[in-house]
Structure formats: C-alpha cells, structure tokens
C-alpha cells in the first residue's frame, strides 16, 4: 500500500544540508499540514519545493527537488 504522501509535493522547512542528512518538509494532507523528516541525495535549502518519492517508517521521506513543467509554474 502506498502512503498518501508519496507523490505529493512539500516545502522544505529545515534544510537538508548534505546527501543522506535529515531535514524537514511540510506537506499539505488530510485537510491540514504535517511535518516529515526528509532526506535527499543532494543538499536542498529551506523554502524549496520537493517531490516525495518514497516513505519509510518513522515519518521519514525521501525527496527530490520539484521542477514543475512550464505550464505548471
């Protein structure tokens, strides 16, 4: 079963300072927002939009930078 946050976008609230390091991401879900621990293969700064690509136990998510298509910007 896929977690409901997988495939959603979120905003980095605490930067991911290095590959594999933990930061935080805020995700709009279930009519509110929730914070997840986030990790990535590259540094991502606070305020950046990310795509959640995988969910792990303990509210940890793997993210990648979100680059919207030109008609979605």
Image: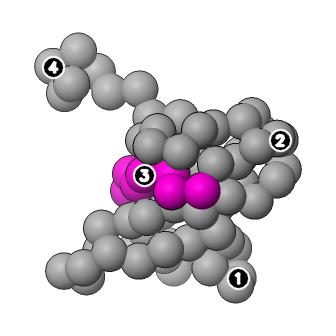
In this view, the mark in front (2 or 1): 2
Cα–Cα gap, marks 3 and 2: 18 Å
Q: Nearer the viewer, mark 4 or mark 2?
A: 2
Q: Along the polypeptide, which appears first: circle 4 or circle 2?
A: 2
Residue linked to disc 3: 11
Which quadrant of the structure image shows residue 66? top left
Decide which of 11, 55 is in the foreground and name it: 11
> Is-magenta flag for residue 49?
no
Q: Residues within 10 Å of mark 4 (few under 14, many from 20)?
A: few
Q: Give the secondary structure at mark 3.
A: strand
Q: Main secondary structure of the magenta part?
A: strand
Residue at position x 30%, y 67% in the image: 28
Residue nearest the viewer, comparing 1 with 60: 60
Q: Residues within 10 Å of mark 2 (few under 14, many from 20)?
A: few
Q: Which residues are magenta?
A: 8-14
**CA separation in Å, label 1 and label 3:** 20 Å
> What is the total number of numbered labels drawn onto the structure image?
4
Residue named by callout 4: 71
Which percent across, then down, holds residue 72?
19, 27
Label 1 sits on a secondary structure element that is: loop
Q: Earlier in the sequence, mark 2 or mark 1?
A: 2
Mark 3 surroundings within 10 Å by alpha-carbon count, few (fewer than 14), some (14 through 19), many (20 or more) = many
Q: Which residue is mark 1?
A: 57
What residue would you read off at disc 2?
Answer: 19
């Amino acid at each position: 079963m896929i977690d409901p946050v997988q495939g959603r976008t979120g905003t980095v609230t605490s930067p991911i300072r290095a590959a594999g390091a933990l930061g935080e991401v805020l995700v709009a879900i279930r009519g509110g927002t929730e914070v997840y621990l986030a990790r990535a293969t590259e540094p991502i700064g606070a305020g950046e939009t990310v795509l959640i690509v995988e969910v792990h136990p303990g509210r940890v998510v793997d993210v990648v930078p979100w680059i919207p298509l030109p008609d979605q910007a």
